[in-house]
Image: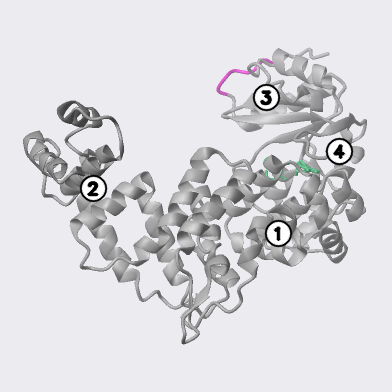
């Protein structure tokens, strides 16, 4: 057993910790390899990597070794699945016992796993060849029995072994495949692609949470349009998020829009910064156009209220994917308001600008980014002619920001009103308060001026509001 004194000083750097870990496992007679995405990304020259290890050691042994090395208290939440987390520098590395099989019961978020005994077994149950390489941390040798390196340099995404079997075992791999191909700009190998298209329906057995997490990663990636294109071409889009089907259903988008709804949506999605709510808002901003489409006598299509109907559809789609209330509310707000930003003109009063800001709250900057991308996404890559309009709106928002927009509330509360007029709660309170708030926003009433506020309220009550 470990004889040298391998306990680590807390400040040890990553390489030294990996080295010590490798030695401790070897001393215990166990194998330990770096595996998975870290190997792939390092071969692609990417830095700042997650560390995943595969080992012959059973979880209990891994915990003992980690504790002996003083690697903090190991994270044991994944122990049942063979995964132990240890802190290496400022990161958590996962050390997972070799698996021979990893299956997901329909709808389940956690796999059924069988422990294996060899590295080859463990690599063979992984999803794609580029994710199925290992490196010996002691001497740096690459172990690549499945040809991952060749596929990586040829830019090919290929399932390990029989793709149909791989996707049957865990249909989430269908989405993972698209995500990796999109992120890396790889071609999906023909048999793998055929299996994806033919197995797409199996996604219905995958939990919504796992599907959600894949969509999140795809949308936060650098070219989400590539992922969306592959999703559509493979049939995975209707199989995973059927609520998105309307986006594919409107090729004729009217004379003002040279692109189909789908192509327009892809342009907007790529053009907004990669934050989750903004990317989803870009996907969903026009989702209700097909449903709200009407025609003028001239034949020109109109899409009245598509932003409101679309906000409802967005809420439905994202709730079904089990996104958090915060994410859903942010996307719904951005979808619901997107036409309001387009309607901006220089003759808006400051009150109108402030009202928009109050409605958008902390999402104001994102709403402008969406509006800019949306406008640019109608012009086939030409510089958007209405960029100056959004520059101006942004400048006016900046100016108003200094005026503490959040203080712009009615000087009187509902309780104030009820006790003065001796009336029961009811819609009359909202009417008076919003009249007062609007007067504040329009700069006609100071938020502290209760005296003047009472005069306005008295007048409204006298008119039997
Ligand atoms: P990234 O973290 O950049 O998305 P990754 O390859 O590290 O990519 P992880 O989900 O972190 O992906 O998984 C680490 C490794 O575990 C993968 O490289 C792959 O070998 C294996 N793996 C993960 N999920 C699955 C799965 N559903 N089926 C088969 N193998 C998987
Ligand atoms: Mg990873």
Image quadrant holding the N terminus, namely top right
Q: Which residues are drawn in magenta?
A: 5-11
**Residue of label 1:** 237
Image quadrant holding the C terminus, namely top left
Going from N to C along the chain, the mark reached first, 2 or 4, is: 4
**Residue of label 3:** 86
Closer to the camera in the image, 163 or 233: 233
What is the distance, in whole Å, between disc 4 and disc 1 at their CAs?
A: 23 Å
Q: Which mark is residue 183?
A: none
Going from N to C along the chain, the mark reached first, 3 or 4, is: 3
Q: Main secondary structure of the magenta part?
A: loop
**Residue of label 4:** 103
Q: Say few, some or many: other residues with alpha carbon within 10 Å of mark 4 (under 14 / 14 to 19 / 20 or more).
A: some
- Disc 2 vs disc 1: which is toward the camera? 1
- Callouts 3 and 4 close, C-beta under 8 Å: no
SS under mark 2 = helix
Q: Which mark is residue 401?
A: 2
SS under mark 3 = strand
């Amino acid at each position: 057993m470990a004889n040298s004194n391998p306990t680590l000083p807390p400040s040890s750097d990553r390489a030294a910790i990996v080295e010590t870990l490798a030695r401790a496992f070897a001393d215990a007679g166990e194998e330990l390899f770096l595996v998975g995405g870290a190997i792939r990304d390092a071969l692609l020259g990417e830095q700042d990597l997650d560390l995943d290890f595969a080992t012959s050691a059973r979880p209990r042994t891994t915990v003992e070794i980690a504790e002996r090395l003083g690697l903090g208290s190991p994270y044991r939440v994944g122990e049942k699945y063979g995964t132990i987390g240890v802190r290496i520098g400022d990161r958590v590395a996962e050390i997972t016992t070799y698996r021979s099989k990893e299956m997901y019961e329909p709808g389940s978020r956690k796999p059924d796993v069988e422990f294996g005994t060899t590295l080859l077994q463990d690599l063979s149950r992984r999803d794609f060849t580029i994710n199925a390489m290992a490196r010996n941390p002691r001497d740096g040798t690459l172990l690549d029995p499945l040809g991952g390196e060749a596929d990586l340099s040829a830019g090919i995404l290929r399932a390990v072994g029989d793709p149909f079997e791989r996707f049957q075992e865990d249909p989430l791999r269908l989405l993972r495949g698209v995500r990796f191909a999109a992120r890396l700009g790889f071609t999906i190998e023909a048999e793998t692609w055929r299996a994806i298209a033919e197995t797409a329906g199996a996604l219905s057995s995958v939990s919504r949470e796992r599907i959600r997490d894949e969509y999140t990663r795809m949308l936060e990636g650098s070219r989400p349009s590539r992922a969306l294109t592959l999703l559509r071409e493979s049939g995975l889009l209707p199989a995973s998020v059927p609520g998105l089907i309307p986006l594919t259903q409107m090729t004729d988008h009217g004379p003002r829009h040279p692109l189909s709804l789908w192509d327009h949506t892809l342009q907007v999605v790529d053009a907004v910064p990669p934050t989750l709510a903004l990317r989803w808002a870009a996907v969903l901003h026009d989702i209700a156009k097909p449903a709200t489409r009407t025609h003028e006598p001239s034949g020109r299509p109109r899409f009245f209220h598509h932003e409101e109907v679309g906000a409802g559809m967005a809420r439905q789609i994202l709730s079904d994917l089990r996104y958090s209330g915060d994410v859903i509310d942010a996307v719904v707000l951005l979808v619901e308001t997107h036409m309001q930003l387009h309607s901006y003109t220089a003759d808006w009063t400051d009150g109108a600008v402030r009202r928009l800001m109050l409605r958008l709250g902390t999402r104001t900057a994102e709403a402008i980014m969406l509006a800019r991308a949306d406008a640019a996404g109608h012009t086939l890559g030409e510089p958007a002619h209405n960029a100056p309009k959004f520059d101006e709106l942004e400048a006016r928002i900046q100016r108003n920001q200094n005026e503490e927009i959040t203080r712009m509330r009615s000087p009187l509360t509902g309780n104030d009103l009820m006790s003065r007029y001796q009336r029961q709660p009811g819609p009359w309170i909202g009417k008076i308060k919003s009249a007062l708030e609007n007067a504040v926003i329009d700069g006609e009433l100071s938020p502290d001026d209760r005296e003047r506020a009472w005069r306005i309220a008295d007048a409204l009550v006298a008119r039997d509001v």
